[in-house]
Every structure is written in structure tokens, then in C-alpha cells.
């Protein structure tokens, strides 16, 4: 059974901010690699949402896409809600889920 994936507005905005940063600082190849890695992770999450690390404090799961970026998500009954794409170099105290 595959769970449908729902993008929160914050997840969509943070994803595009990361792509904008990659566009300014890196090459097209890195952008494509990041997009591919994200699509692979979303496919894994859809098939098995319990696969990644769970945080009881935030009641969310964390998938490290690349060492600089993590994806936080929650499971809501029969769907997965993407919460935010997080730049791991930021202050973790600013992460509010």
C-alpha cells in the first residue's frame, strides 16, 4: 500500500528556497542530483513511511536527503504530510514543527 504524499505550504516554499540556493551556488548537475534524491526519498516514504528516524519531541520523522538538507514529515491516518525541508546548517532551535 502506498500512502499519498501531501505537501504543506511550508514544505513547498522551503523546497524551492533550497533549489534557488543550489541554482545560485552550484551546478545544474547538483540540482538534478538533489531533485532525484528527493524523488527517491518520497517514493520510499510513500511505500514505507516508518522507514526514517522518528522524533518523539516533534512527533515527526526525519529523512536526511543530503548531509546539508533533511526532510521532516508526519503520518496522518492514511497519508504523509511533508512539513519542511530543513538546511541542517541552521540553528536547530529555529526548527518549529
Image (cartoon, rainbow, N blue to C red):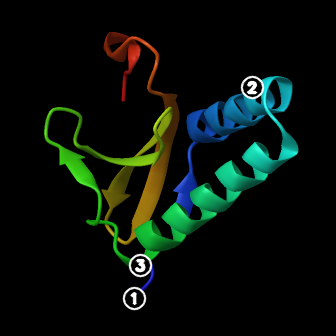
Q: How far from the left and from the top, in percent, is residue 42?
A: 53, 64
Secondary structure, mark 1, is loop
Asked if residue 54 is positioned above or below residue 43 in the image, the reply reads above
* Mark 1: few/some/many CA within 10 Å (<14, 14-19, 20+): few
State the residue at coordinates (46%, 15%). Answer: 90
- Density class for disc 2 (Cα within 10 Å; few <14, some 14-19, many ≥20) is few
Q: Residue at (76%, 45%) from the top-left corner?
A: 31
When asked about the image quadrant of residue 28, the answer is top right
Q: Is residue 49 left or right of residue 83?
A: left
Q: Earlier in the sequence, mark 1 or mark 2?
A: 1
In the image, residue 34 sits, relative to residue 51, either above or below, namely above
Q: Counting residues from the N terminus, which is met first, the one under dot 1 or under dot 3?
A: 1
Q: Which mark, by number, is residue 1?
A: 1
Residue placed under numbered mark 3 in the picture: 47
The Cα–Cα distance between marks 3 and 2, rounded to whole angstroms, is 30 Å
Q: Residue at x 37, y 72 (%)?
A: 78
Direction left: furthest residue: 56
Coordinates of residue 20 in the picture (x, y in percent): 79, 29
Foreground residue among 56 and 40:
40
Counting from the top left corner in percent of width and height, residue 96 is at 37, 22
In the image, residue 79 lies at what x, y percent? 42, 67
User: Residue at image x 84%, y 32%?
Assistant: 23
Nearest to N terminus: mark 3 or mark 2 = 2
Q: CA distance from mark 1 to mark 2?
A: 35 Å
Query: Does dot 2 land on a helix, a strand or a loop?
Result: helix
Is there CB contact under 8 Å for labels 3 and 2?
no
Residue ID for mark 2: 21
Amino acid at each position: 500500500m502506498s500512502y499519498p504524499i501531501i505537501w504543506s505550504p511550508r514544505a513547498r516554499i522551503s523546497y524551492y528556497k533550497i533549489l534557488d540556493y543550489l541554482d545560485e551556488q552550484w551546478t545544474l548537475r547538483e540540482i538534478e542530483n538533489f531533485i532525484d534524491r528527493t524523488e527517491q526519498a518520497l517514493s520510499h516514504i510513500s511505500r514505507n513511511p516508518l522507514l526514517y528516524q522518528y522524533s518523539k519531541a516533534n512527533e515527526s520523522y526525519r529523512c536526511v536527503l543530503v548531509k546539508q538538507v533533511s526532510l521532516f514529515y508526519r503520518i496522518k491516518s492514511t497519508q504523509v504530510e511533508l512539513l519542511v525541508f530543513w538546511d541542517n546548517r541552521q540553528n536547530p532551535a529555529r526548527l518549529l514543527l
